Image (cartoon, rainbow, N blue to C red):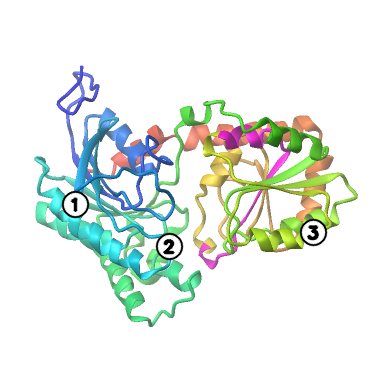
Amino acid sequence: MPDDYGRNVSPEVRTKHVVWYLAKYASPREYFFGTRHFELGTEWSRRGHHVAVFASNASHLTDALPEFNGRYMIEQIRGVTAVWIQGLRYGRSDGWKRIVDWALFEWRSLLAMRTLAERPTVVIASSLSLFSVLTGFLVARRYRARFIVEIRDIWPLSAIVLGGYSRYHPFIQVLGWIERLGYEKADHIVGTMPNLVEHVSQVSPGNGDKVVCIPQGIDPEGYNSGASPPSEILDAVRKSGSFRIAYAGTINANNPLDALVECGRRLRDHDVHVIILGSGSKREELELMAQGLDNVHFFDPIPKSQVARFLQEVDVCYDSFSSALGRYGLSRNKWIDYMMAERPIICSFDGYRSMINEADAGRFVPFNDPDALATEVLQLKSLAGSERKEMGRRARRYILENRSFDKLADKYERLFGS
C-alpha cells in the first residue's frame, strides 16, 4: 500500500533511514539522462528509506531540467523527494559563473533543508561540486548523521591534470583543503572508480580503509526500449563494410580518437571500417585527419535511447582515455552501453584495468598506439562470428550480474549503519 510519500511499500518494510543526497548535477530520467543518485534513491525508497536528492536545475549539459520561480522547488519522483535548487545558467563548463553557481547551490540547499520535516540520519555528498562535501559535513555534524563522501570525479586533481591549473593556485588550494577535510571526516568514502583507495591514501594518509568502490550502474529496463535510429543512419552503417569498429560518444581531448583514425588508415585494404558517432571540440580536427579515407565514417549524435540499437550494427566497440587520472581506474557509462549492446570492446588505455578484462569481453591496448590497435582489430576480425558473439554475451552478463542498481543499492545500504 502507498505511504505518505506516495510510494508502494510492503507492510513488513519499515523506514530505516532518512537519506539526504547532495548531488548538484543529479538528474532523473524523467527530465534528462538518469544519474545514479535518483536510481539509487528509487531503490532505497522501495526498501522503506526516505530519500531526498538535492540537485540543481542549471547544467551546461542540458536545458531540459525544470524551470520554476523561487529559490527551490520540491517534487516527488518515483518515491524520491527531488529538491530542485534554482541555479545560475551558464554555457561553458570552465567559466567563473560555474564557481558562483556551486556556491549558490550550497546556500540555497541549506535554505531548502529547513523546510523538510524529517532530519537526516545519513548525508551523502557527491562530487562534483566539491563544495557539497563541506556542506554535507556541516549538516551531518549538526544532525549527528552518518557522513558519506561520494567521489565520481577526483577534484581538484581533475582541474590540475585536465584544466592545466597549478596546484598552487589559491582556488585549487581551497578545493584541496575541502577534499582532505571530507576524507578525514567521512564515515565512508564511496568511489565509482575501482582504485580510488590509492589516491585517498596519497592525499589523506590513514583514510584509505574508508574507501568502498560502488561503480556506475544500470537500470536494465532502460536498455530494452527498442528505440531505433533513423533508417538512413542504419542503412549507411550496414553498407559501410563487412567489419566495423565503432566509437559512440563525445569527441574531445580526454577521449582522443587519433589512433582510431590512423588504425582505419592502416586497415583500409582489409575491409575494416571505422564508425564515429558523436560531436565535440575535436571532431572537426578529426574529420580533417580522416580526409581521403573512404573507410572512416562520421555520424551526428543520436538520442541515448537509440544508441544500443545503433551499436548492434557494428562488430566491435572502441574507447580511448588519455588522462593520468586513469591510474585510479574508470567506471565508464560508455563501457556499460557497449557491453549491454553485447559487443566486444577494444580500449586504448594505460591505466588501472577493470570491467572489460574482468568480463573477458575485449582487449586493452597501449594508449595512442595505432599499430597495436590495428593488430588487435585484425585478431578480432579473424575470430569466428560465434566467438565474438560469445564475448558480447559475456559482456552483457557481467553487467547484469554486477551493475544493476538494485545490487549497487544493497552494497551502498550497508554503509548506512543501524
Q: Quadrant of the N terminus?
A: top left
Kindly identify the residue that appears in the image at 22 percent across and 29 percent down. Answer: 48
Q: Which residues are magenta?
A: 306-325
Which one is nearer the viewer's eye here, 176 or 314? 314
User: Quick one: label 1, few (<14), some, or many (20+) residues within 10 Å?
Assistant: some
Q: CA distance from mark 2 to mark 3?
A: 31 Å
What residue sits right under mark 3 in the picture?
291
Q: Is residue 299 visible?
A: yes
Q: Amino acid at mark 2?
A: Ser
Determine whether label 2 and label 3 are within 8 Å by CB: no
Q: Residue furthest bottom?
A: 168
Query: Could you tell which of marks 1 and 3 lies nearer the N-terminus?
Result: 1
Quick one: SS at disc 1?
A: loop
Q: Quadrant of the C terminus?
A: top left
What residue sits right under mark 1 in the picture?
71
Pinpoint residue 217: horizontal percent, then vertical percent. 45, 40
Kindly identify the residue that appears in the image at 73 percent across and 38 percent down. Answer: 315
Q: Residue furthest front?
A: 69
Query: Could you tell which of marks 2 and 1 lies nearer the N-terminus?
Result: 1
Q: Is residue 342 visible?
A: no
Which one is nearer the viewer's eye here, 171 or 69? 69
Which one is nearer the viewer's eye here, 306 or 220? 306
Which one is nearer the viewer's eye here, 225 or 352? 225
Quick one: SS at disc 2?
A: loop
Q: Amino acid at mark 1?
A: Arg
Q: CA distance from mark 1 to mark 3?
A: 50 Å
Residue 314 painted magenta: yes
> Does residue 254 lie above or below 362 as drawn?
below
Q: Taking 36 as reference, is 109 left or right? A: left
Determine whether label 1 and label 3 are within 8 Å by CB: no
What residue sits right under mark 2 in the picture?
93
Kindly identify the residue that appears in the image at 80 percent across and 53 percent down. Answer: 264
